[in-house]
Image (cartoon, rainbow, N blue to C red):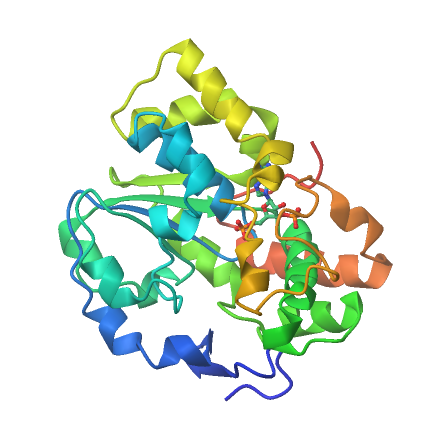
Amino acid sequence: QVDDSAWRRVKLYKYKDVSIPGHVVTILDNIENFKVREDDIWVVSYPRSGTTWTQEIVYLIKSGLNFEAANSQIIDDRFPFLEFMYPGIQNVESMSSPRLIKTHLPLGLLPKEIHEKKPKIIYVCRNPKDIVVSYYYFTRMMKPITRFQGSFDDFFKLFMQDKVPYSPWWKHVLEFWQKKDEENVLFLKYEDLKKDLEGSIRRIAEFLDKPLSDLDVKKIAYHCQFENMKKNDSTNFSWGTKLGILDLTESQFMRKGEVGDWRSHFNQDTNEQINKMISFRFHNSGLHFDYDI
Ligand code: A3P
């Protein structure tokens, strides 16, 4: 168990050096032995990297632009989160093909069959400064579960010490960056979605072998604009309040949707600390992050 973690009620555990919430620890065997299918589509990411945004784009492409379902069925029903309590890993396993699956697990904890069946995997990454800010508000919003009451600087420390779920962040990203040239992997950046949403939608559609007309791209881009996803009760996680796991007076799942919000949260010291970590971990990798666009 990790002491002083950001998650006090659902406790955090270390498994293979990764911080994992208690409810996930209990199903690690089921995850390892999960039956993967070649025609699955996986969206994999560290939390707060743009997962939901990417899922919505993938869903619309795969469903042939089913906006009706995208506006009326919560995303967890259309594109389940593998290790979350709802709908539960057994239900994900028995879904009909082609399955769309979200997970925050790092490469090393994905089902064994991922390497054999090679389903299409979209990995989403985001610059870590905006991630920490977004994750801080998310952790406060999840107060009924996390009990987190601290400041941004308190949360920053926990992030740097890997005491937040799915950390270490840098390893999560680097492991997939090393797989970016494999045929079944698309490595996507949040900042690229922000810079060129239509181009990114086209890129995802080509990767999924589902080329789109210009009009379809525009329709998907409109549906996936931040303000529209924030209004959409199927993507804004407002149903979490009914489950008693979200406190929307703290923050919202669709919070700001910007690149560069970190500038109003970091001071010189925290900025130097994270810059040092980034250059230490990524200096030879060829991976660069955009902190402003
Ligand atoms: P912020 O807290 O910075 O606003 P994830 O889905 O991986 O948990 O990521 C959540 C982050 O993605 C949040 O960031 C959220 O607002 C942002 N996001 C979700 N949909 C978005 C969209 N359509 N456009 C821009 N940002 C979006």
Q: Quadrant of residue 291?
A: top right
Quadrant of the frame with the C terminus: top right
Tell me which image quadrant ligand 1 sits in: top right
Residue 261 is situated, as x and y percent measured from the top left of the image, at 75, 45
Please say whether residue 286 is visible from this viewpoint: no
Residue 260 position (above or below residue 201): below
Residue 219 is situated, as x and y percent measured from the top left of the image, at 47, 19
Q: Quadrant of residue 25?
A: bottom left
Q: Residue at x 47, y 62 (%)?
A: 171
Q: Quadrant of residue 109?
A: bottom left
Q: Residue at x 49, y 44 (%)?
A: 234
Residue 238 is situated, as x and y percent measured from the top left of the image, at 58, 53
Q: Nearer the viewer, residue 56 or 156?
A: 56
Q: Nearer the viewer, residue 145 or 273?
A: 145
Q: Residue at x 55, y 61 (%)?
A: 240
Left or right relative to 207: residue 12: right
